[in-house]
Amino acid sequence: MTGKLDIVIAGGGRVGFQTARLLEERGHDVTVVEQDSDRCAVLADAYVATVIEGDATNPGILEQAGVETADTVAGLSGEAGLNLAVCLAARELAPDVRTVARVDTAERAAYDRFVDAVVFPELAGARVAANEVLGSDVQSLADTTGRLDIMHLRVAEGAPAAGKSLAAVRLPKGAVVVSDESGDRVAGPETVLTAGERYVVAVEPGVADEVMNLFRG
Amino acid sequence: MSGSQRAPAADLGLLDATMIGMGAMIGAGIFVLTGLAAEIAGPAAILVFVLNGVVTAFTGLSYAELAASIPKSGGGYAFVREVFADLPSFLMGWMLWFAYMIAGALYALGFAPNFLELLHVYGIVPPPEQVGAIALPVVDAAVPAAFGLAFVAVLALVALNAVSTAASGSVETIFTATKVAILLVFVAFGATAPMFSTAEFQPLFPAGAGAAAVLPAMGLTFIAFEGYDLITTVTEEVKNPRENIPKAIFVSLAATVVVYLAVVTVAVGTLGAEGLAAAGEAGIAEAATQFMPTGIPVIRNGGAIIVFGAVFSTLTALNAVVIASSRVAFSMGREGQLLPRFGQLHHRYGTPFVAILASAVVMLGSVALPTQSAGNMSSLFFLLSFVVVNGSVIKLRRERPNMTRPYEMPFYPAPPVIGIVLNLVLTAVLVEYLVRTDPLALALSAGWILLGGVSYVALGRAADTERGPGEPAQTAPAGDDS
């Protein structure tokens, strides 16, 4: 399977925009639906996603965004109700589509019946804030890496790097495999990338796409 | 392009983007095709290049609008993939891939006689027409020198691109500046040469054929203007793309037309249409050796600069299309429209290895074609794919009226409609011309489309089996697409 996904994001605000940027860097096709025309211009300038201007709960607009052929639809606007409506409408148009909704409460379980996954960005934000408030020298990774991405990456069956040792794989400059497959040791040149196993990988945004290609095929 | 993924994002300015487009358009096309165009159209070869510039400008508007609003590198195929269903987008990629591969063969075939001419200028070999076949002791057969050279050139550049990532945009800028400078030297000396002052552009059109001869010559040389598809394959690396991409497309196109106009006028004015036609692929180089000063130290012969320019241009253009063709196959592989292997980077070399090798096979095979057939086939497929690109703009405007379009073409829908009509007219003229003069090229083109249809059905079958019988197939059953 190719790792490239077709993703529609409803809401091009701060959360929607940053999510679109991260997904684009990892090589996916992103379409953003945003109602505010000034915001649309900002999104177009960033050149990370195709932008559709309009109300994402309007089925006509969702169709223009290509929901029917999308792999995933994510409602990431600031209004939980709107996000939920987008996901439900998307499911109606394309029963197989994966749906993700941004909610405004930590009570995620209530939404499980309607969407495949929920996000509560404030919780992640609160972790970052708590870290900063304490000002500790030791912090969890999520908020100290700047643009660098530390990810858990599973090697796909048949991917170019599968079954090869790190010495044989030329990772692009700006990418480092941190752990071996057991997760107990730091990876070295002799570490073999076994299909189906997960590795901790540090990646700069510019080469994320290429690393995905090597690991995911 | 393959190298871009290792490079930092968004570091190409307007100048770099313009130079990438000009680099693809100015160079091999002008050196290789001028003689062939003169053969068909006589002194009207001047008109041929200008008219082609006008025809391409309409498609240029479509490219500008698509590139500004769809943030994807990958050129025409990526845009069409966004707009059209599986089969049309597959065919678009399939045609564009072929057009680039055949263009590679064309540039290799143009490289060979110019390289022989360069060696001749330095007295290493006799004049190109006297260089016969090179005997190969191993296979006990004689291979024409030009064919052998073209083959080796393709092999060398493919090997280079297969194991290492390509030159970056700034190198491209230096290359293009070199080419333009050499052509300017050519124009400056040619326009002041005594031969030019007695230039004879009458009769403008060849006897018998009349003005109609311009059309098949336009078909043949259309490939010279494929450059902006190349600009749009690097859009993600361009700073402020929504402003700079449309600008780069228009500036490079306008500059290219001006340079072509000057070069072809000088070439026809000095060597005459018959002389140019007789020199074929080495037309410009031949013209230059006539009027450039001789007796210069080191380089000996001023014409050598131009001949060097021709060799340099054909090689850099060949390199560019090796990258471009593998890039199309790579994108198709990633989209699941070719075997997934095509869409993977090699684990050691970090290049789209399989895509490059597959492109190489077709390119090496095509080197056996006559130059003119290669030019005709490549032009034919660029014309057809440009029709689809113009169609995408119209379809996108109708189906996604709310899409944010940072650049909107003026006078919509006139430009894409005119673009489609003009491209189809040239396609028809070219097909008619091929039926009369080159049925082999036409048969090979039809064969490629047929092969595409078969691959599409076979890939669809394979995907269905993988998915299992219970789940619906995403790909519509392939219809008759020949």
Image (cartoon, coloured by chain):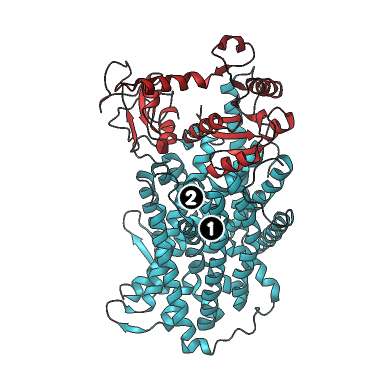
Chain colours: A red, B cyan
Residue B248 circle label: 1
Residue plotted at (48% across, 37% down): B342
Locate residue B85, reporting x and y percent: 66, 37
The residue beneath circle 2 is B238
Q: CA distance from mark 2 to mark 1?
A: 10 Å
Badge 2, how many Cα within 10 Å: few under 14, some, many 20+? many
Residue A155 circle label: none
Residue plotted at (61% across, 12% down): A111
Locate residue B365, reporting x and y percent: 48, 51
Instruction: State whether residue B263 is above or below residue A26.
Output: below
Residue sitting nearer the eye, B97 or A104: A104
Residues behind callouts 2 and 1 on a single chain: yes
Instruction: State whether residue A172 is above or below residue B323.
Output: above
Taking B371 as reference, is B442 left or right?
right
Confirm whether residue B261 shows in the render: yes
Badge 1, how many Cα within 10 Å: few under 14, some, many 20+? many
**Mark found first going from the N terminus, 2 or 1:** 2
Residue plotted at (44% across, 35% down): A209
Q: Secondary structure at mark 1?
A: helix
| Amino acid at the residue labelled 1 | Ala
Residue plotted at (43% across, 40% down): B352
| Amino acid at the residue labelled 2 | Val
Q: Secondary structure at mark 2?
A: loop
Locate residue B33, reporting x and y percent: 53, 67
Res B148 → quadrant:
bottom left
Are the residues flagged by discs 2 and 1 in contact, CB closer than 8 Å?
yes
Q: Chain of mark 1?
A: B
